[in-house]
Amino acid sequence: MMEDDDFEPEAIKRFMYVNRKAPYGTIYALESLETVLISAAFDQDVSVVFLDDGVFQLTKGQDTTGINMKNFSPTFRALEGYDVEKLYFEKESLEARGLTADDLVVEVEILSTDELREIMAAQDVVISA
């Protein structure tokens, strides 16, 4: 029988989710968001990176009526309630698509490719979708 004194909490892991896909047309973006929320619910250190077409996942004014899908971009506002506050955008991906921080539904930190590479290297787990 295990006593309370024998219990040691598990170490917190640093998880980074890298979102590269457009928000619609595949299931990757929505499943990544769900996985982020689940990880955060287990008190892990979670960060999310958006690059390539993944930068479109957080754009304002998404109209999905023509494709019969629910617009899930407002769900990203829930991340703060799960203490997921490390949201990063790759500067080069944002600029290549003509977007700025003002086009996004939540506040993010915009970093260069080299800065993101450093942050990624410090993670315990990096998952790309």
Image (tube, rainbow, N blue to C red):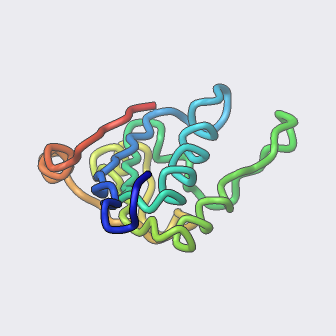
At a point 54% along the width and 65% down the height, the residue shown is 79
Above or below 44: residue 108: below
Closest to the observer, 87 or 99 = 87
Count of numbered badges drawn on the protein? 0
At a point 21% along the width and 45% down the height, the residue shown is 120
Above or below 82: residue 129: above
Q: Position of residue 72 (x, y in %)?
A: 71, 51
Answer with left or right where residue 122 lies relative to residue 124. Answer: left
Answer with left or right where residue 8 lies relative to residue 118. Answer: right
At a point 28% along the width and 56% down the height, the residue shown is 11
Closest to the observer, 102 or 5 = 5
Judged from this view, the residue extending furthest toward the top is 26
Q: Position of residue 7 (x, y in %)?
A: 35, 60
Q: Position of residue 128 (x, y in %)?
A: 39, 32
Quarter of the view holding residue 3: bottom left
At a point 46% along the width and 47% down the height, the residue shown is 55
Quarter of the view holding residue 127: top left
Closest to the observer, 11 or 121 = 11
Answer with left or right where residue 74 lies relative to residue 125. Answer: right
Closest to the observer, 47 or 111 = 47
Q: Position of residue 66 (x, y in %)?
A: 85, 37
Judged from this view, the residue extending furthest toward the front is 1
Answer with left or right where residue 102 lies relative to residue 113. Answer: right
